[in-house]
Every structure is written in C-alpha cells, then in structure tokens.
Amino acid sequence: MPSRKHDFTADLAALGYPGFAYLRTKVQKNPAGVLLAALNEPNLDARVVEGLPWLMLTYVDMDWDWLVRNVKVRDRQNRLGFAVSLASEVAESKNDSERARKLRQCLQVLESGRLAREDTFCRDSMTQAERQWLREHSSPAAAHWNLLTDMKGEHLAYVSP
C-alpha cells in the first residue's frame, strides 16, 4: 500500500484527459508509469478508473513491454488485460483499426499470464453483497479477466483520443 495519497486526477489532467480538463496541472508523467501506479491501487476514484482506457487509447505507443513486465511482477496483469479490452472495444467501435491492432497485440501477450484468482478493478473495498452481484452481472470481458466490475467500453464518457 502506498505511503501517501497519489493524485491520479492531476496525472491524468496533465496527460490531457478531458474528464479532468478543469484542473490546472503542468507536470506530465510517463503514461505507462501512471497506468501502472493506478492499476496497483487497491481503491481508486471511479472517475480515475474511467480514464484508464482513454490513457491507453491516447498513448497507444507507450512502452508496453515495460508495462507488461511490471504489472506481472505485481500480479496486476488481469487489471491491465481488462483495461486494454475496454480500450480495444472502444477503438473497434470507432473503426480505429491501427489502435485496435496495437491493443490486441498487448492482449495476446497478457493472455498467457492471465491469473485465475478473482480481483476487482481497483475497488477492493466493495462489500460482499456487491461482490456477489458482480459475480453474476459482470461483462464477458470482466469475467474473462476474473475481475469484479460492471464497467463496459460503451459507458465510458471520454474515450476518444
């Protein structure tokens, strides 16, 4: 667990995320580093979680090799796999074949390291009742990545790069 509260809203705002455009931030961090840090958090604000697929769509040329290596060390590859699935879904729905191709390549790499254990999409504090409901109502992509979430690409507000 991190020793200090990380301000992911400022990180996403500095990287250009429209959901936090109202924030005045200047220090731009490495998108892959921001993504890794966010995926490693046990609990994130839902607005930050919604920004993660946008981050991957916008910075599709980030250092995926570094990112995949580091999520595997932290056992967060299912969280990344699900987030990439969302971003890929959005890219395909917008007929952005180049971004969709790059994201599918990343999914192929992550697939071989998919974990069998159940996890959440950065919401570890959910109740047992919520967990049970999500076991029955998660999307096929969330179920594939063994994540308890009802997030779908079609519901993301700021996904266009």
Image: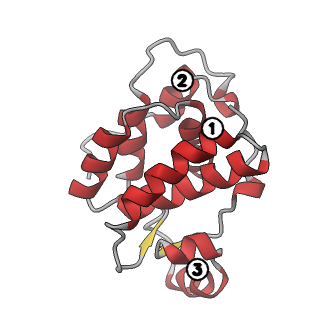
Q: Looking at the image, can residue 43 be seen?
A: no
- Front-most of residues 102 and 12: 102
Q: Looking at the image, can residue 109 be seen?
A: yes
Which amino acid, by three-letter code, is at mark 1? Glu
Q: Which image quarter: residue 15?
A: top right
Asked whether disc 1 touches disc 3, contact meaning CB atoms under 8 Å apart, the reply is: no
Q: Residues within 10 Å of mark 3 (few under 14, many from 20)?
A: few
**Which residue is rendered at x = 56% and y = 49% of the image?**
49
Q: Residues within 10 Å of mark 2 (few under 14, many from 20)?
A: many
Pointer 1 or 3: first along the chain: 1
For label 3, the residue is: 130
Q: Looking at the image, which residue sits at the far top?
A: 26
Q: Nearer the viewer, mark 1 or mark 3?
A: 1
Taking 10 as reference, is 152 above or below it?
below
- Could you say whether the residue bearing mark 3 is in a helix, strand or loop? helix
Report the Cα–Cα distance between label 1 and label 3: 37 Å
**Which residue is rendered at x = 44% and y = 50% of the image?**
106
For label 1, the residue is: 98
Pointer 2 or 3: first along the chain: 2
- Front-most of residues 133 and 107: 107
In percent of width and height, residue 53 lies at 59, 46
Which amino acid, by three-letter code, is at mark 3? Glu
For label 2, the residue is: 15
Taking 85 as reference, is 8 above or below it?
above
Would you say 58 lies left or right of 97 here? left
Report the Cα–Cα distance between label 2 and label 1: 21 Å
- Could you say whether the residue bearing mark 1 is in a helix, strand or loop? helix
Report the Cα–Cα distance between label 2 and label 3: 32 Å
What's the coloring here?
secondary structure
Asked whether disc 2 touches disc 3, contact meaning CB atoms under 8 Å apart, the reply is: no
